Image: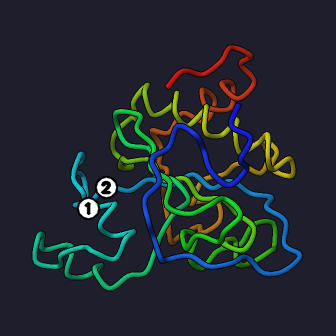
Amino acid sequence: MNSNPDYFAHATRVDCSFWDARPDNVEISLLVIHNISLPPGEFGTSGIRDLFTGTLDKTAHPFYKDIAHLRVSAHCVIYRDGRIEQYVPFSGRAWHAGVSSFQGRKQCNDYAIGIELEGTDELPYTDAQYASLTSLSKHILLHYPLITCGRIIGHNDIAPGRKTDPGPYFDWARYRQSLFDNRESQL
């Protein structure tokens, strides 16, 4: 078992400066699932990493000129092959939720952990992604007990009308059931 609550042992750490400290006396109590692909609809590129590290070349793709200036991050990204990169320690505040609210409480970045799945709203996620998401989520739930199943939500749930991810192809039933599976998740 990984005993460090800030980092997931099976993730590759990537330096990222787009995060800061959470406000004092704020407890982590929400897990937000997102999707991202850069360029849109393309997988296996360095676009996500480049965006989250501030190195996105705005001339590399027409879409990039509109987003290269953004200062955004997530705690972790899970790629199509199941690889996990961690950009922000879980105790830190990643900049993933934007304008958001959960059960009347605003500024979800203050109290949420954000996980990005490499994907789109138009395609199913891979078995490898579900396996990695389950393993990562179990680590998070172990160390942050205020996050319960009802507090694991999609980006669309905290920014309705503005965001649609993780999209209609994310299998919430499969994912939630996997969290209660006693067998060890394999990466």
Rendered residue at 65%/72% (across/down): 93
* Distance in Å between CA atoms under marks 2 and 1: 8 Å
Q: Position of residue 163 (x, y in %)?
A: 50, 66
Check the picture and name the quadrant holding the N terminus: top right
Task: Count residues near mark 2 (Cα–Cα under 10 Å), then give few for <14, some for 14-19, many for 20+.
Answer: some
Task: Count residues near mark 1 (Cα–Cα under 10 Å), then give few for <14, some for 14-19, many for 20+.
Answer: many
Residue nearer the viewer, 170 or 118: 118
Is 174 left, or right, of 48 in this rendering? right
Quickly name the residue at label 2: 37
Relative to 20, residue 61 above or below? above
Q: Position of residue 32 (x, y in %)?
A: 63, 56
Q: Is the residue under label 1 in contact with that under label 2 (CB below 8 Å)? A: yes
Q: How many marks?
A: 2
Give, as a three-letter code, the residue at label 2: Ser
Relative to 180, residue 105 above or below? below
Is 15 left, or right, of 1 in this rendering? left
Is 166 left, or right, of 154 in this rendering? left
Q: Position of residue 176 (x, y in %)?
A: 68, 32
Q: Position of residue 15 (x, y in %)?
A: 44, 66
Q: Residue furthest bottom?
A: 69
Circle 2: element type: loop
Is 18 left, or right, of 57 in this rendering? right
Rendered residue at 69%/78% (across/down): 21
Rendered residue at 57%/60% (across/down): 155
Quickly name the residue at label 1: 47
Mark number, residue 167:
none
Relative to 47, residue 60 above or below? below
Give, as a three-letter code, the residue at label 1: Gly
Rendered residue at 60%/26% (across/down): 174
Residue nearer the viewer, 8 or 112: 8
Circle 1: element type: helix
Mark 2 or mark 1: which comes first in sequence?
A: 2
